[in-house]
Image (cartoon, rainbow, N blue to C red):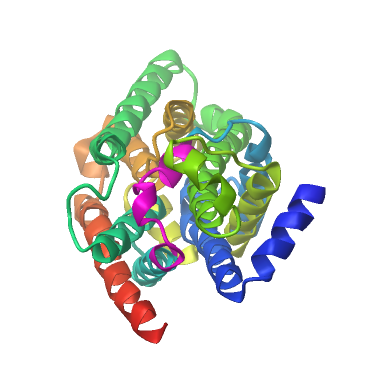
Amino acid sequence: MEAFLRDLVAIFNHPYVALIFIAALAFDFINGFHDAANSIATIVGTGVLRPFQAVCWAAWWNFAAAWLFGVHVANAVAKWVHADYVTPEVIFAGLLGAIVWNLITWYGGLPSSSSHALLGGFGGAAMVHAGKWGGVLHTTKVVATVEFIVLAPMIGLTLGLLLTFLLLWALRRVSALKVDRWFRGIQLLSAAAYSLGHGTNDAQKTMGIIAALLYATVWKSQQAAFAAGSIEFPFWIVLVCHLAIGLGTMAGGWRIVKTMGMKITKLRPYGGACAESAAAVSLFLSAKWGIPVSTTHTITGAIVGVGSVQRLSAVRWGVARRVVWAWVLTIPCAGIVAAASYKVIEWLR
């Protein structure tokens, strides 16, 4: 508590830093709001829970993740940009780019990646600040993230397809009515597991940004350690970020729920449980490896995999195509908005 109060006083002694800190928490809240669909789409789409019940369930598990998975992803995000190019203006512009892109895709009902919007915004602002393309971002972090833009949905798809196939074979002699009744309860557990994965992966993105901000401003005496890659995350940052994303999830995101849970493919409780379980496993692994993957990509791939088990025509490929385009455009578009935001901030200051 003493460290939290000391840091909070230091932050609010600098109004500009306080503004960026609040913007980071606002992004975290919007992330939860935007990605609430990922956590609740399948459980709402199958009719197991009503939307409000589902967001409460998901929000609790988003917050509970604070005690379970460490800060490997937060470290990766904090190190996304070389320390020489991390300034308050770069961080602020990166956040604005991510927030604007999230709101655009939310309005269009497209489940784009909040994670990649943040990384694209952070990187785009840093490049404009540096005045160059090369040597601004940590190459290994960028390569791993870009690889998992493809791998995350493919892992989710493969696991979702495999789980559904094995389940249908194992329960081939059980009536569909009985299977649905069993899996209405099981899906509560799979939704909780997915929400844990969502909470740990996405809340850590904001932790990384807040840590980068504090090292660049109120923790200046530790900048050398930050530049060398030694990053510490006081537990108050972990709690605040998980609380913000949990509250955002509580606010919901019904436009995207309809796309994820109802438009891509029609799900039954066993399919919803398989999709959530497949996505949860993928997110737990990425959290362990410290790779900032997209929870949106992962759950969408899992839903497509589950729907494909019945027949390929069960998946509405037109909707899926729009979703993929949103994925492709997220990093560059968020980067462009952040670059423009950086120029405006620089002009105003």
Could one spot residue 306 in this view of the protein? yes
Residue occupying the point 51% across, 57% down: 213
Relative to 342, does residue 281 appear above or below in the rendering?
above
Nearest to the observer: residue 278 or residue 32? 32
Quadrant of residue 256 in the image? bottom left
Could one spot residue 310 in this view of the protein? no
Nearest to the observer: residue 271 or residue 230? 230
Quadrant of residue 118 in the image? bottom left
Q: What secondary structure is the stretch in magenta mostly built from?
A: helix
Relative to 307, does residue 208 appear above or below in the rendering?
below
Q: Which residues are magenta?
A: 73-91
Which image quarter holds the C terminus? Answer: bottom left
Residue occupying the point 32% across, 50% down: 264
Residue occupying the point 27% across, 56% down: 331
- Residue 41 part of the magenta-drawn span: no
- Residue 78 part of the magenta-drawn span: yes
